[in-house]
Image (cartoon, rainbow, N blue to C red):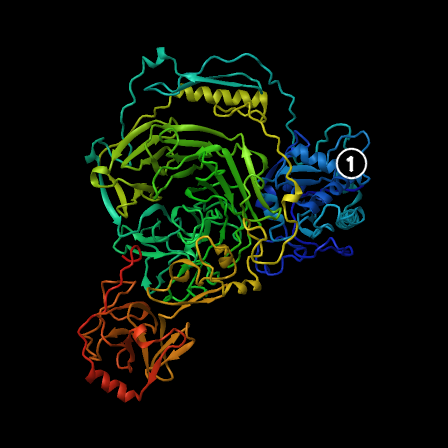
Amino acid sequence: MRLLSVISFGSLWAWSLISAPHATDGQTHVGCDATCPPIGYEYDTSHLCPGFTVDDISASKTYDVCYPQNYGTVSLSSFRKKGHVTVLSNVYTGCEAGRREAGLFAGLAQRIHEETGGNVVFVSSLKGGGDCSAWAEIYENDAVKMGFSIGESAWTMPLTVSDNSFELRDHFFTPPYPHPSYMILNENLEVTYKSVGPCCGYISYYDCTDDIALELESILTKNIYEVYNKQLETFTTSTWAATTPVAADTTTTATIEGINESPFSLPCQSTTYSDWSECSLTCGNGGTQFRFRLNSVDPIETRPCPAEIVDTLPPCSQQCVPEFGPSTSTESFDLSVVASGLDSPRDLAFHPTPGIHLGNYSEGRTFHPTKGEELWVVNGNNHSISIVASLGTEYQTTISRRDRGYYHYMNNVTALAFNEVKSSNRLEAQDTFNFFAVCNDNLNDYIGAKEPNFFMGPTLYDTDVVNKRGKMNTVNRHGADCSDPADQCFFLHADMLHESPACVGIAHDPELLTAYGAVYWAFDTTGDRSGNGGQLVRFDFSQPHGPGSMDHSIASVRRYPDIKLYRDDFSHSHAGMIVHPGKRILFISNPGKNGGEVTAVRIDTGRYSRTAREEYPIFSNRLPSFEYSIYECTEEYTFASGIRNPSGMALSLDGERLFVAERAGKILALEVDSGTVLQTIDVSPMGYTTIGGMAVSPTSGDLYFVDIDASEVVKVEASDGECTYNSLLNSGYKSDIEFSQIEFSANCGSSVPFSLTRDFSCSVSGIIPNGTLFEQVHTDGYASENPDVQSDAGMDASAALLTNRTDCEYDSGLNFDALLLGGYFCHVCLPQNHGSSCDDGGTCQNIQWQGFTCDNEFYVDYDDDSDSLVLSSLYYETTYSHENIIDIFRGTTYRFTVRTGDDRPVKITQNLDMTGGNSISISRLQNPSSFEDVTTGPILVSIDETSPDFIYLTSGELKPVTFVIKHREAEGLTDDNMPTTVLPSAAVYFSAQEAFMWVALLSLVGYAAFMD
């Protein structure tokens, strides 16, 4: 007697088995290495490899079995028992190799299931697109063609799981592990075998012949029974007799231990409707009524509340919400500016873990992570994020950061959203808690420098620097981890997807199903580019590729064309979006629809319809592991109408009130249960007429908003006094809904869920995508041959050929995306100072795939051996001492990054009076109003026509470093060499004191949104 259990999913990457088939001309070995963990991921603890045991959380997860029908759910923990063996498999519907092996796996599964009396359970995950029945029909037919036969019996294996959230793949076959692949677990759910199918790497379905594909049968059978027989030897006769299962009846649907059946044999054919419910509202127009019948066809009818009832209702008057205060007048609240000097701020959000990004010290500045909250604000005009640290305390300060490639990754950034789900029970190595994504309102035009190609979408960042030292979540200019507290730091993106150009809103989905929690919803204003509005798009970054990679093959993007979204007419826009975590409803500001409304979407209701690769040909990756799908039959409804240009949006801490801003200055508090306005305030008399994003403090519950034109963050401070309100939802209506839900569940099962917003006439066929739409193997090269699609490799040595390209015109043939993918952070064609973030007047030099250097940046260190200051330039690869006189040039801002430490304060002065009375005026990022000595961090000095001819870098009694100020043009100099003069140290010191008297002071450097 054999006692077994087996499970299967889907994907394509590589191949390697115990006995590998001979290679043919149709096969490639790229990406089929079955090493676990994959090479290069040796320290990634999320990979489940032989010798590892499935953790309790992963084992206890339940998965919906969609075929055979009516099986209910399955959990791996059910198979953690004596004598059991569990085998898992991993394939994608768009993968030719996976399709080839799926039929064999089905036949193998049915055979072993029957010969072991129903004690071997196979489970196959459906992912990559398609309908369960259609997918099952394919693999069952293929099994028969390969010689497997079940006679008159019904197919009971494999159990197909709808792996729409990629839970099975990401827990058991964490990418980049190849596919099709298989795993065997023993009775303790310990991994005993994990490898890749023999068809992996074959481009065509037919290239992997029957002889090659059939090797899977012998390999799996051998390894399954190795584990099974070893466990069987430990059984005593009595133990075995007590645990031997009864053979399954193969003529009917078998009952398998660990699977909760819910057969659809319930009455749900009634033609009689119930009485009409009570009206939904207790005031105004009364809302709506509904009635239902227990029938799968048109079970719900709705109508407006009848006039005879409406006539008895009072008007819906203004009430009081705690965020505004007890009065409805403008005196009921105060406004306080908490941050100013921003640069067209569009959105804001509170960081879920203050301090993990900035720590105690960054860029030469001191921060206090335990003091107050941390507010992040996106600036559209300078493509940056301003971080307001220690909000509302005496330690409050603001620092600004952006991506080095901001012209692509943060171009006209207009919205951001954090993953705030702290207690998700996800694996630490996979959890994206504290990540955030931004939305960019542009068509990928490189800040107007390039003809748009629509290859644009949300960018994902990991903010955790304190706990992830060395991971390069922030980097300095030349690409090293920004761990030096003196360095200027830049964000380094963790991932980016490219299917929502001109995006004006984004929201994180607090779902708990996916392994990484990196699901975001975006407002794509372009839609199908027909001019008929935009669409809702769901982005699951799945496994973020991480800093420094360009691989976008592991992700899922789903379009919802039936959710129509329309932007406003403003160039500086923001559309608020937020997911209600309890109700699983996405609220969206929809300013261009019906004069302005809030659209509500039940985000768990859409169903796969077809691949999006044909209708929307611009997407991130062509491999089968990148899902790009169209979902339809999604439930939506108008939550609130008559809102003029709705913009920002926020949810109260208790989830009962939704705040919606009208751009021109009004803020409405709406009751979530009823959709009615509870209270409105008007901030336009205070000068705020361009409201963007809004956010609620996670500790105080106070409401904050940004004003785009005022470039300020403003806090709404409610007046004192008692503040309560009565719900406008009719309790009788609520009871009617609860009763109806119970009746539906009892009589119609889960196949016909009770819903007042569902279109029951809507249906989808779930078309299996054509395999020719996918690349079947990973390819080398930094860009796909298809100019609209990015390759997975991301970087290649051939990118060096782009170095000398100068066809930078707006409509030239040079793809600027190829420059980024080719590792160019500084290139003559990239916008705004050749794409670099050198300070004004600086010239950059690219360090391919790493970063760039600037000719106007010096590092300042103290050398113990010579007891002197030492300057270094990465641009010129040169070190300078006090014996050098260094030429610098007018019209340039110089950055001196000081790293001398507390005992060696540094300053720049116009003479060598050691009293410091004539110190030159400088601009310092850490405190631009102070000219104290610097020990760690930047000094910025702007050299212009009023500047003196010499300046000095000094530190106490150490010999100074001398700079002579020149005009580049007058000197006829280029940037090929840094001109220096070596003089005897005594002469330098003497001539500097006696010969030069300065009158002009250096100008201060101002950076909007970059300083306090």
Q: Is residue 161 above or below residue 783?
A: above
Q: Nearer the viewer, residue 910 or 491?
A: 910
Which residue is painted at 27% across and 89% down in the image?
A: 986
Q: Quadrant of the C terminus?
A: bottom left
> Callout 1: 10 Å neighbours few (<14), some, many (20+)?
some
Q: Nearer the viewer, residue 1000 or 355?
A: 1000
Res. 330 image quadrant: top left
Residue corresponding to mark 1:
117
Left or right position of 807 against 659: right
Res. 253 image quadrant: top right
Where is residue 938 shown, x and y percent of the image?
32, 67
Which residue is painted at 54% across and 12% down in the image?
A: 272
Res. 1004 image quadrant: bottom left
Q: Nearer the viewer, residue 600 or 627?
A: 627
Q: Quadrant of the N terminus?
A: top right
Left or right position of 536 against 347: right
Label 1 amino acid?
A: Gly
Tell me if residue 244 can be seen.
no
Q: Is residue 716 above or below residue 808?
A: above
Where is residue 244 shown, x and y percent of the image?
77, 38
Where is residue 667 shown, x and y percent of the image?
29, 35
